[in-house]
Image (tube, grey):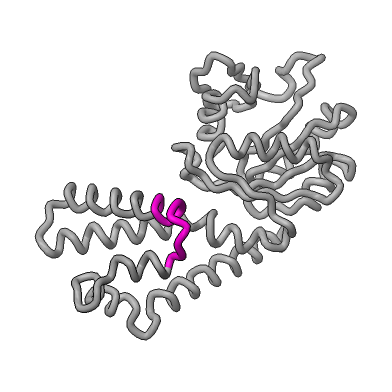
Amino acid sequence: MGGALLERWQQSTLIERFDVIEPQYAAPGSRVTWHRNLESLPPDYVPDVVVFAVKPQHLDAVLPAYKIRFGNANPLYISIAAGKKLSFYASHLGERAHIVRAMPNTPAMVGEGMTVLCSAPTLPASAKKIALDLMSAVGKAEWLPNESLMDAVTAISGCGPAYVFLFLESMVKAGVAVGLPEDMAKILSCQTVLGSLKLAAQSGKTLEQLRIQVASPGGATEAALNILMQSNNLQSLLEKAVDSATARSKQLSEKN
């Protein structure tokens, strides 16, 4: 995800220079300087924004050095690590540190991500704008009014792409089962979902209205919906899935 953000940000005019600390990997980029560790940065280097795109279990070892190095400069810290609460970052970076938690999802790789952000109420408006502008460069971004909702966000937009991909997998397999070549079934399924999403976002109609609009009485769509909506099966299954993801996200965050 960190690599996807970097690639999209390089295509924008928001940032003049990128310094990336990554001991094992370096991708080409005209405005990117790669460093093996924090110590290899110039002694007088002061960043405006620091983005933590590392695995959550590594943060305990990573964060203290940043407080030592940049504590007086107080840059904006943005973390995309799942599960770690604002209080965790404050305990490592200091109570005065400007910290934002961000939950992007994988469509950010193609500039269509959904990112939700949260911060302490004391975060300056100027810092909030910077964080929102950065994450808006990879798709849509919204501020969350309460950090406690981050687990629900994780279950919907964080995990959500996997639900959509599973639906597409199933749709393709169903197309093959009724005689379509697999490549054709994939093209039809992906474009249908893409077009439907754009229509849902732009039409101004409710999702229910759009569904009814497609389903003519006695037609093929109605026959399919009678199966999908039988005993509210699909809705019930999705609610159970989202509830399970939310509960697991809470379990993981409570460890932090």
Specify the farthest residue to the bottom. Answer: 231
Q: Quadrant of residue 222?
A: bottom left
What residue appears at the point 76 percent right and 49 percent down from the top-left corner? 119
| 9 relative to 32, above or below | below
Q: Quadrant of the C terminus?
A: bottom right
Residue 40 x, y percent position in the rendering:
71, 18
Q: Is residue 14 left or right of residue 28?
A: right
Residue 116 on the magenta segment: no
Q: Position of residue 118 (x, y in %)?
A: 72, 50
> Quick check: 11 above or below 210?
above
Residue 243 sits in which quadrant? bottom right
Residue at left offset 77%, top offset 51%: 86
Taken as a whole, is the magenta stretch helix, strand or loop? helix
Of residues 246 and 253, the one drawn nearer to the viewer in this rendering: 246
Residue visible at 52% across and 22% down in the picture: 26
| Residue extent of the magenta highlight | 197-207
